[in-house]
Image (spheres, grey):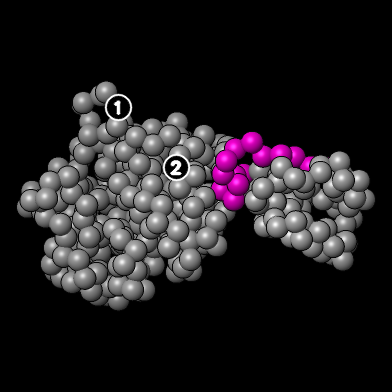
Amino acid sequence: MIIILKKQAEEAQINALKKEMTDQGLGIHESEGVNTRIIGLVGDTSVVDMRHIMANSIVENVQRIQEPYKKANRKFHPNDTVVDVSGVKIGGGNFQVIAGPCSIETKEQITEVANDVKNSGAGLLRGGAFKPRTSPYSFQGLHGDGLKLLLEAKKATGLPVVTEIMDASHLPLFEDVDLIQVGARNMQNFELLKELGKIDKPILLKRGLAATIEEWLMSAEYIMAGGNENVILCERGIRTYETATRNTLDLSAIPVIKKKSHLPVMVDPSHATGIREMVEPLSLAAIAAGADGLMVEVHNDPAKALCDGPQSLTPEQFDSMMNKVNKTRQFFETL
């Protein structure tokens, strides 16, 4: 339920209304836009008498929210959320590119790629230390040693770093990670999401392999309900009947999310297709669809990569793509 306040409402009156609601066991979520101030009520609002609230002189309108997600709902928060990742802003017109290798392999590899993607304009560095793989015999990442190498690359370049967490017990290792990624396989790992809701660190939440948009937003709600509202969504393709690509990139999810939620939404074209040649055109299409950023895999020697070499761009290919990304963004900014 949301309560839309009148412009002339005084703070003392607003505080009295909020206390009345909290006395009924409801949580309060406030949002203030240019012309509107909203009080969102979180909890069991079935016992709330809408007519009683409407009788309050400072209330403009009262609406019940039908969607099960509340804090992620644009009705609760009309303005776009801007997530600050160690000084790098994403959302609300701030576009960023996250780039780097699928897996961290050596100090030389991650540092070389970090310098290359920074020089090409990437704002954040990605690199996998813990790798969820379908086969137990595939390379699983360097784990803690990989995180150390990633942080060395961060120190060398100044780029904030992004890496995936597999289990809540690993959180102590992620203290110096700037943006924690929840992978597709863990999108509905609710115990992990609850723990991430307790920390003061931005979360990049990837869409599950066959998750609906509502399920995806409900996973974001788990994090936000715990108190951590710095969530970035990432569309990375969903499983369909199509076999020409690894997954099917759902670009329609971008405008749908923009309508339903205030959270930033990025696109990962590398995992979506698994095909290097398709990363660039889908990146440009994502910009046209309104994405707040891209997440792209870049490797200095894709042919010898220990993970996802076929979908990784070389630094030269990434640099070329970034030139087109910048031109495409400039074009759409003029419309």
Q: Name the image quarter holding residue 163.
A: bottom left
Depth check, front residue: 327 or 290 = 290
Classify mark 2: helix, strand or loop. helix
- Give the image location of residue 261, x and y in percent: 56, 43
Depth check, front residue: 325 or 260 = 260
Q: Which amino acid lies under the numbered mark 2 shown in the image of this protein?
A: Trp
Segment tinted magenta in the rendering: 61-74
Which numbered dot is residue 274? none
39 relative to 158 in the view: left or right: right
Task: Please give the count of numbered marks on the rendered protein.
Answer: 2
- In the image, is residue 113 part of the stretch drawn in magenta? no
Depth check, front residue: 160 or 212 = 212
Quarter containing the N terminus: top right
- Give the image location of residue 150, x and y in percent: 25, 69
Magenta stretch mostly in which secondary structure? loop
Q: Residue at x 30, y 46 (%)?
A: 185
Judging by the rendered image, the residue that carries numbered circle 2 is 216
Judging by the rendered image, the residue that carries numbered circle 1 is 240
315 relative to 229 in the view: left or right: left
Q: Which amino acid lies under the numbered mark 1 shown in the image of this protein?
A: Thr
- Give the image location of residue 16, x and y in percent: 84, 62
Is residue 88 positioned above or below 188 on the image? Answer: below
- Give the image location of residue 158, x and y in percent: 34, 72
Q: Name the image quarter holding residue 169.
A: bottom left
Q: Residues within 10 Å of mark 1 (few under 14, many from 20)?
A: few
Farthest-out residue, top: 241
Mark 1 or mark 2, earlier in chain: 2
Q: Residue at x 48, y 66 (%)?
A: 198
